[in-house]
């Protein structure tokens, strides 16, 4: 029977020194290879976990933009064309004879107590008053014009210490002393008497728009020398007769200026005579004063738009016009955002549109103040 020798036990194996060293090197190489493989595997795993091609976790949907349902008063408005200028025509009528030697330039603002123009080198001075002068001022002159002169002398400081009553309607000895101070200030002969035409009474400062004469021309009594206005900004609009039922003195208006900013104003005058236009429509001039005259910023004859309120409703539910959703059959709805993020459509009936505020009156089942409705994102 043939026998085969079994391999000797591991302990009995004798490995030559060189062979054992070679075996250790092999084991080291294998171990290193395993580490490399594990490292590469970890890198592959890491790359697999973080590679940008893998989809990121789904983000929650952004919260839509909303606006509140509000209960308030709104108004419907209609815009008409207008012009921004200055109130009142303040023409200066000359009464002195001679040669015109000085004139203001258009745009100049002349305050009471200042020179309007000169005749033969002598100043014609502006004084505050509603009644025009019609005669010379001398001792004993009595009347409304005399009272205006006394008041002007007191206001301008020429009566300091003279104890002149600004309500006094007579030129007294004290008035004459104040007149002399006035004459001295303007280089006039200190006579205590003012020639007719030396002063001009107008209700306010004058904003010069034009001069009706030229330097060196003769000054003719009764002739307009300066054309002007007050310094108070004013809007004048041509309002269709069909809208006059909605306009009265004291009404508030909104004025859109050339730079598209808005200014508030108040109706001061509604014309009584209509003008027929070529288009066949008829209009009436309506004037309004700005609440803050500074908003006019020096504009003159500038085109503006005037918004006139034609209807007002109080205590109604409103939403922004942009919240409306058009449905089939000429119906509209708003999307109401519920607590928790869900939303539902609520069919609404439309009422008054407030174009200036961008709001609309609405009503619908389940709609109430305080709810949030979806609007287009800004």
Image: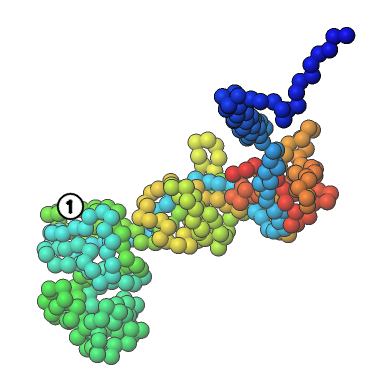
Q: Which residue is mark 1?
A: 214
Nearer the observer, 121 or 7: 7
Query: Relative to 336, is 90 above or below?
Result: below
Res 215 seen here: yes
Identity of the residue drawn at 64% across and 25% down: 15
Nearer the observer, 69 or 103: 69
Q: Farthest right residue?
A: 1
Horizontal side, residue 356 vs residue 287: left or right: right
Identity of the residue drawn at 24% across and 57% down: 225
Horizontal side, residue 208 vs residue 20: left or right: left
The colour style of the image is: rainbow
Residue 336: x %, y % from top left: 76, 47
Horizontal side, residue 154 vs residue 329: left or right: left
Identity of the residue drawn at 25% across and 72% down: 113
Residue 360: x %, y % from top left: 69, 48
Secondary structure, mark 1, is loop
Residue 192: x %, y % from top left: 17, 81
| Quadrant of the snapshot with the C terminus | top right
């Amino acid at each position: 029977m043939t026998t085969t020798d079994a391999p000797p036990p591991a302990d009995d194996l004798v490995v030559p020194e060189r062979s054992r060293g070679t075996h250790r090197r092999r084991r080291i190489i294998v171990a290193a290879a395993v580490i490399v493989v594990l490292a590469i595997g970890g890198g592959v795993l890491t790359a697999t976990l973080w590679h940008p091609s893998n989809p990121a976790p789904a983000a929650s949907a952004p919260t839509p933009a909303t606006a509140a349902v509000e209960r308030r008063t709104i108004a419907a408005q209609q815009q008409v064309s207008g012009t921004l200028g200055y109130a009142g025509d303040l023409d200066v009528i000359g009464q002195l004879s001679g040669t015109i030697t000085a004139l203001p330039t258009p745009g100049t603002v002349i305050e009471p107590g200042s020179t309007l123009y000169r005749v033969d080198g002598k100043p014609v001075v502006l004084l505050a008053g509603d009644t025009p002068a019609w005669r010379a001022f001398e001792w004993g002159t009595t009347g409304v014009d005399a009272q205006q002169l006394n008041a002007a002398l007191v206001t301008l400081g020429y009566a300091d210490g003279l104890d002149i009553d600004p309500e006094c309607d007579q030129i007294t000895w004290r008035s004459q002393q104040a007149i002399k101070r006035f004459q001295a200030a303007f280089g006039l002969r200190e006579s205590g008497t003012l020639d007719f035409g030396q002063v001009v009474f107008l209700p306010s400062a004058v904003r010069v728009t034009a001069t009706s004469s030229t330097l060196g021309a003769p000054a003719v009594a009764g002739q307009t020398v300066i054309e002007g206005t007050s310094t108070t900004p004013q809007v004048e609009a041509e309002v269709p007769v069909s809208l006059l039922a909605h306009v009265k003195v004291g009404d508030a208006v909104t004025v859109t200026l050339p730079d598209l900013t808005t200014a508030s104003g108040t109706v001061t005058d509604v014309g009584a005579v209509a003008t027929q236009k070529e288009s066949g429509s008829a209009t009436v001039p309506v004037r309004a004063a700005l609440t803050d005259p500074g908003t006019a910023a020096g504009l003159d004859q500038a085109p503006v738009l005037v918004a006139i309120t034609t209807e007002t409703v109080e205590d109604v539910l409103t939403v922004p016009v942009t919240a409306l959703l058009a449905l089939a059959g000429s119906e509209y709805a708003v999307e109401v955002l519920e607590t928790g993020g869900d939303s539902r459509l609520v069919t609404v009936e439309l009422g008054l549109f407030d174009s200036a505020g961008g709001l609309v009156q609405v009503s619908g089942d389940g709609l109430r103040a305080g709810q949030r409705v979806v609007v287009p994102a800004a």
